[in-house]
Protein backbone atom coordinates (compact mmCIF):
# COMPACT_ATOMS: atom_id res chain seq x y z
CA UNK A 1 0.00 0.00 0.00
CA UNK A 2 1.37 3.40 -1.00
CA UNK A 3 1.75 6.12 1.65
CA UNK A 4 1.02 9.76 0.82
CA UNK A 5 3.67 11.69 2.74
CA UNK A 6 2.20 15.07 1.70
CA UNK A 7 -1.09 14.38 3.48
CA UNK A 8 -1.56 16.14 6.82
CA UNK A 9 -1.56 13.71 9.75
CA UNK A 10 -4.86 13.37 11.62
CA UNK A 11 -3.47 14.57 14.97
CA UNK A 12 -1.92 17.66 13.37
CA UNK A 13 -5.12 18.48 11.51
CA UNK A 14 -7.17 18.24 14.72
CA UNK A 15 -4.84 20.61 16.56
CA UNK A 16 -4.96 23.06 13.66
CA UNK A 17 -8.76 23.00 13.65
CA UNK A 18 -8.89 23.50 17.42
CA UNK A 19 -6.50 26.44 17.32
CA UNK A 20 -8.48 28.02 14.46
CA UNK A 21 -11.71 27.64 16.43
CA UNK A 22 -10.06 29.18 19.49
CA UNK A 23 -8.87 32.15 17.47
CA UNK A 24 -12.27 32.69 15.89
CA UNK A 25 -14.06 32.54 19.23
CA UNK A 26 -11.56 34.82 20.96
CA UNK A 27 -12.68 38.26 22.02
CA UNK A 28 -10.73 40.13 19.33
CA UNK A 29 -11.36 43.85 18.72
CA UNK A 30 -13.14 44.88 15.57
CA UNK A 31 -10.92 46.27 12.79
CA UNK A 32 -12.98 49.47 12.64
CA UNK A 33 -12.50 50.18 16.34
CA UNK A 34 -8.73 49.72 16.04
CA UNK A 35 -8.65 52.13 13.09
CA UNK A 36 -10.63 54.71 15.04
CA UNK A 37 -8.25 54.41 18.01
CA UNK A 38 -5.24 54.92 15.75
CA UNK A 39 -6.83 57.97 14.10
CA UNK A 40 -7.53 59.54 17.47
CA UNK A 41 -3.95 59.15 18.69
CA UNK A 42 -2.40 60.41 15.43
CA UNK A 43 -3.52 63.97 16.10
CA UNK A 44 -1.83 64.12 19.49
CA UNK A 45 1.83 63.68 18.54
CA UNK A 46 3.72 66.02 16.24
CA UNK A 47 1.37 68.93 16.91
CA UNK A 48 -0.58 68.12 13.76
CA UNK A 49 2.40 68.73 11.48
CA UNK A 50 3.12 65.92 9.02
CA UNK A 51 6.55 64.43 9.59
CA UNK A 52 6.69 65.09 13.30
CA UNK A 53 7.76 67.93 15.48
CA UNK A 54 8.96 71.25 14.06
CA UNK A 55 12.15 72.54 15.64
CA UNK A 56 13.00 76.16 14.90
CA UNK A 57 16.72 75.90 15.56
CA UNK A 58 19.48 76.46 13.06
CA UNK A 59 22.46 74.19 13.02
CA UNK A 60 25.78 75.77 12.31
CA UNK A 61 28.67 73.61 11.19
CA UNK A 62 32.05 74.88 10.17
CA UNK A 63 33.31 73.03 7.10
CA UNK A 64 37.07 72.71 6.96
CA UNK A 65 38.48 72.05 3.48
CA UNK A 66 40.74 69.06 2.90
CA UNK A 67 44.37 69.89 3.57
CA UNK A 68 47.23 69.23 1.14
CA UNK A 69 48.53 66.37 3.27
CA UNK A 70 45.13 64.59 3.42
CA UNK A 71 43.25 62.34 1.05
CA UNK A 72 39.76 60.82 0.87
CA UNK A 73 39.68 57.04 0.79
CA UNK A 74 37.76 55.85 -2.26
CA UNK A 75 36.38 52.84 -0.33
CA UNK A 76 35.24 54.23 3.05
CA UNK A 77 35.15 57.95 2.05
CA UNK A 78 36.95 59.02 5.23
CA UNK A 79 39.50 61.83 5.11
CA UNK A 80 42.87 60.45 6.20
CA UNK A 81 46.44 61.68 6.48
CA UNK A 82 48.56 60.82 3.46
CA UNK A 83 50.68 58.49 5.62
CA UNK A 84 47.63 56.17 5.68
CA UNK A 85 47.66 55.57 1.91
CA UNK A 86 47.97 51.85 1.23
CA UNK A 87 47.34 51.80 -2.52
CA UNK A 88 46.71 54.16 -5.41
CA UNK A 89 44.74 53.10 -8.44
CA UNK A 90 44.49 55.83 -11.03
CA UNK A 91 43.09 58.93 -9.33
CA UNK A 92 41.77 56.91 -6.39
CA UNK A 93 43.58 56.28 -3.11
CA UNK A 94 42.74 53.60 -0.54
CA UNK A 95 43.54 53.70 3.17
CA UNK A 96 45.31 51.01 5.21
CA UNK A 97 42.13 50.05 7.05
CA UNK A 98 40.25 49.25 3.83
CA UNK A 99 43.17 47.30 2.38
CA UNK A 100 43.60 45.17 5.51
Image (cartoon, helix red, strand yellow):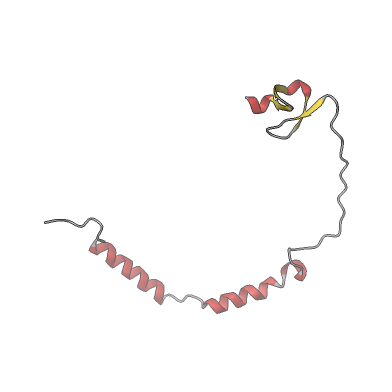
**Percent position of residue 90, x then y:** 71, 25
In this view, the residue farthest toward the front is 90
Q: Can you say which quadrant of the picture contains the C terminus?
A: top right
In percent of the image, x 17 and y 56: which residue is there?
Answer: 3
Q: Can you say which quadrant of the picture contains the N terminus?
A: bottom left
- Out of 42 and 70, give the one closest to the viewer: 70
In percent of the image, x 72 and y 68: which residue is there?
Answer: 45
In percent of the image, x 78 and y 28: which residue is there?
Answer: 71
**Does 34 sit left or right of 49 as displayed?**
left
Above-or-below relation of 48 to 76 = below
- Out of 14 and 79, give the one closest to the viewer: 79
Q: Quadrant of residue 62?
A: top right
**Does 65 sit left or right of 32 as displayed?**
right
Above-or-below relation of 92 to 59 = above
Q: Quadrant of residue 41?
A: bottom right
**Percent position of residue 33, x then y:** 56, 78
**Does 27 sit left or right of 84 as displayed?**
left
In percent of the image, x 28 and y 62: which residue is there?
Answer: 12
**Percent position of residue 17, x then y:** 32, 70
Amino acid sequence: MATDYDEVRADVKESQDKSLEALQSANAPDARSVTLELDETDGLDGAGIPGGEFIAEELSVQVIPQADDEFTCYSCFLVRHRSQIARRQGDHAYCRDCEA
